[in-house]
Image (tube, rainbow, N blue to C red):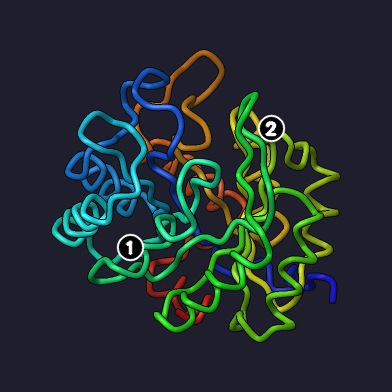
Amino acid sequence: MAYSGYEDYFSKNVIISVATTGGHHGKEANPNLPTQPAEVAEDIKACEEAGASMVHLHARDEDGENTKSVARYQQLRDEIEAVCDDIIVNFTTGGGGIYSREKRIAPILETDPRPEVATVDLGPINFGQTRTAVNTREQNEEYAERMRAAGVKPELELFNPGHIPEAEHLIEEGLLAEPYWATVIFGMQNGMPASPHNLVTFVENLPDPVEWQCLAVGKHQVPLTTMAMTMGGHVRVGMEDNVYYRKGELAESNAQLVRRTARIADELERPVATPAEARAMLDI
């Protein structure tokens, strides 16, 4: 069934997610990108105050390198609990082509408290010249089933419309609870090209009932997330996806990007969701 969520545009709160760090570029791309647990938590605190209701997390080790260490994710969780108010915590299961299937899901299942949300990448995506993250149907069934048992809401990451049938398969298998939470992703290496037409096409084919957010990398972040808000959708911003505030100007912080998004939402007459309101909308 095609997405039909636009009719409640003016009364529907917009969820702002922030992806603070990511698992690829680091301080060499922007010295303001946070990598260490205490630094990340303080950044998230400012993002929550600016209007973010969810944070998407990748852990880095002491040298700033990507890690799947459960202990490191626990440090992140503890620091966030210490300084933040109520923000929804969302862990990645990314890292295909680098980490084993079990290592990718371990932080979701073994931290205390567990994250309320965790990502499921619904298909393959290329990185650079030699790496492909291979996200098989078998893997995604396992992740969705184990998340359901653990009380964690899957966030379906769709890099192109060819991943929609994989979402539908998980639904048909009874592995996802309504409403489905989906991220439509634009501008990745062999993902969906970033354009207004493609955003409309992508969203029109999502399975219903769905709450969806738009993620667009680099210079595409502001135009497509703004368009997503006009369509009744939600948005993800942050330095994982875009280290610039505008062309030639590095972002001062993730909170700066969140504040701009909240300001645009206000101009569009979309109320910004609190964490509690986001939980109610996503049934988590």
Which residue matches tag 2? 189
Position of 148 with respect to 55 (left or right) is: right
Residue 52 visible here: no
Tell me the residue at 28%/50% (across/down): 69
Tell me the residue at 49%/46% (across/down): 95
Tell me the residue at 48%/73% (across/down): 153
The kind of residue on which mark 2 rests is: Gln
Question: Which x, y percent locates residue 98?
Answer: 48, 41
The kind of residue on which mark 1 rests is: Ile
Image quadrant in which you'd find residue 42:
top left
Residue 173 visible here: yes
Q: Secondary structure at mark 1?
A: loop
Question: Which x, y percent locates residue 197?
Answer: 86, 44
Mark sitting on residue 163 = none
Front-lying residue, 93 or 12: 93
* Lower position in the chain sequence, tag 2 or tag 1: 1
Q: Quadrant of the C terminus?
A: bottom left
Tell me the residue at 39%/36% (across/down): 256
Count of numbered badges drawn on the protein: 2
Front-lying residue, 1 or 59: 59
Mark sitting on residue 87 = 1
